Amino acid sequence: QVQLVESGGGLVQAGGSLRLSCAASGRTFSGYTMGWFRQAPGKEREFVAAIWSGGSTYYADSVKGRFTISRDNAKNTVYLQMNSVKPEDTAVYYCATTRVPVFRVAAVRITAYDYWGQGTQVTVSS
């Protein structure tokens, strides 16, 4: 059974940094697209970043230049380094993966992902 477990969330001051991790089990994820999404209270879940097996990445405009997604295929883990965080980054962050590699245009869509973690809360204080 595929499982994704996020960790690393917490409370951070505006301008600070946080690193989220997502450990995957149940299959090898090296060949698949992995993504991070977030959902703030009262808002829809939105795309944050995606990474492909070769290391290519794609970011939402709202986090570009501040967040970095990376993966360690040997550890079946994907990371989200969050720098210069803002109060508007406050949300529950979810990692997700696909059954097959997807194109960039699809990677921003929730429906492209087949497996999801339970989420980790990130709160940024002003």
Image (tube, helix red, strand yellow):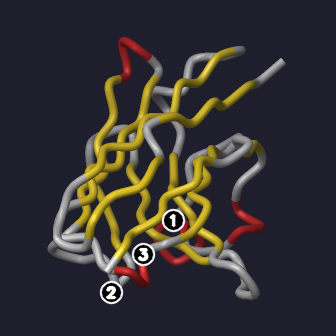
Q: Nearer the viewer, mark 1 or mark 2?
A: 2
Q: Which quadrant of the rendered structure holds the N terminus?
A: top right
Percent of width and height locating residue 35:
51, 54
State the residue at coordinates (43%, 35%): 21
* Residue where numbered disc 2 is placed: 61
Find residue 87 and report its image quarter: bottom left
Reading the image, the residue beneath label 1 is 103
Q: Tell me how far mark 3 sits from mark 2, CA to CA.
A: 13 Å
Question: Crowding near pointer 1: few (<14 within 10 Å), some, many (20+)?
Answer: few
Q: In the rendering, at what x and y percent does residue 64 appear?
A: 24, 77
- Specify whether 25 is left or right of 59: right
Q: CA distance from mark 3 to mark 1?
A: 26 Å
| Badge 3: residue crowd in 10 Å (few <14, some 14–19, many ≥20) | many
The amino acid type found where label 1 is placed reads Phe
Judging depth in this view, the residue of 95 and 56 nearest the camera is 95
Q: Position of residue 54 (x, y in %)?
A: 29, 40
Q: On the rendered structure, is 81 left or right of 100? A: left
Secondary structure at badge 1 equals loop
* Mark 3 vs mark 2: in front: 3
Crowd band around label 2 with a 10 angstrom C-alpha radius: few (<14), some (14–19), many (20+): few
* Mark 3 or 1: the one toward you: 3
Label placed on residue 3: none
- Give the amino acid type for the residue marked by disc 3 in the picture: Asp
User: Does the residue at mark 3 contact the one at mark 1 (Cβ under 8 Å)?
Assistant: no
Q: Is residue 83 above or below residue 43?
A: above
How far from the left and from the top, in percent, is residue 67? Answer: 25, 63
Q: Residue at x 56, y 48 (%)?
A: 101
Task: Locate residue 5: give its quadrant.
Answer: top right
Q: CA distance from mark 1 to mark 2?
A: 18 Å
Q: Which residue is mark 3?
A: 89
